[in-house]
Amino acid sequence: MKAHQIFQHCSPAFSRGIFHYLRTEQKEVYRTALATLATGRKLRPIFVQRKSPEQQYEWLQKTVQIKGSDGVCEHLLQLWLLKAQRNLLVKFLDGVGIEHDGEGAADDLPDEIDAKKLEKTVKALLAD
């Protein structure tokens, strides 16, 4: 599944939560992503930057669902997972048996994940 497809399946509230985290905790990344996405839509970045935070989130939510925004979307999701959701990511990697650095970064990802381990891990995470 591509990053834009993940955002297509996220609720507006969930997407806003990601954008809000990035805007408040990863300000430079947020500004750069906003500018890159605006330029990709043939808009001047200032057009989007002058909007209120809620209007920016609404614009972002529509924009990240477009196929052409995949590169930026991947970066935003990676950053959000590694910074804001580190515990969840570490539990997932441990559950499926992927070696990592203890902070959620893995050098070698397997081509396939054992289906039983995956199911067990997802159920455990959803129960938390």
Image: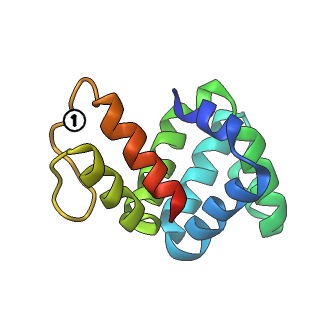
Q: State which quadrant residue 101 falls in.
A: bottom left
Pick whichever, 97 or 25, lies toward us.
Answer: 97
In this rendering, position of residue 116 left or right of residue 57: left
Residue kind at label 1, given as amino acid type: Leu
Can residue 47 be seen at all in this image of the molecule? no
The residue tagged 1 is 109
Query: How is colour applied across the structure in the image?
Result: rainbow
Q: Classify residue 112 by image quadrant.
A: top left
- The residue lying toward the viewer, choosing from 32 and 57, is 57
Residue 65 shows in the view? yes
Between 73 and 81, the one lying in front of the other is 81
Q: How many marks?
A: 1
Q: Residue at x 63, y 53 (%)?
A: 34
- Report the side of 99 relative to 83 (left or right): left
Which residue appears at 60% of the width and 37% of the height?
6
Q: Neighbour class for label 1 at 10 Å: few (<14), some, many (≥20)?
A: few
Where, by quadrant of the figure, is residue 3 drawn? top right
Q: Position of residue 108 (x, y in %)?
A: 15, 38
Find numbered disc 1 in the image and state the secondary structure of the residue it sits on: loop
Q: Position of residue 8 (x, y in %)?
A: 70, 35
> Which residue is rendered at x = 69% and y = 56% of the image?
14
**Percent from the top left, x then y, of residue 40?**
64, 34
Which of the pair 86/44 is nearer the observer? 86
Tell me the residue at 39%/44% (across/down): 120
| Residue 60 vertical placement versus 91 (above, below) | above
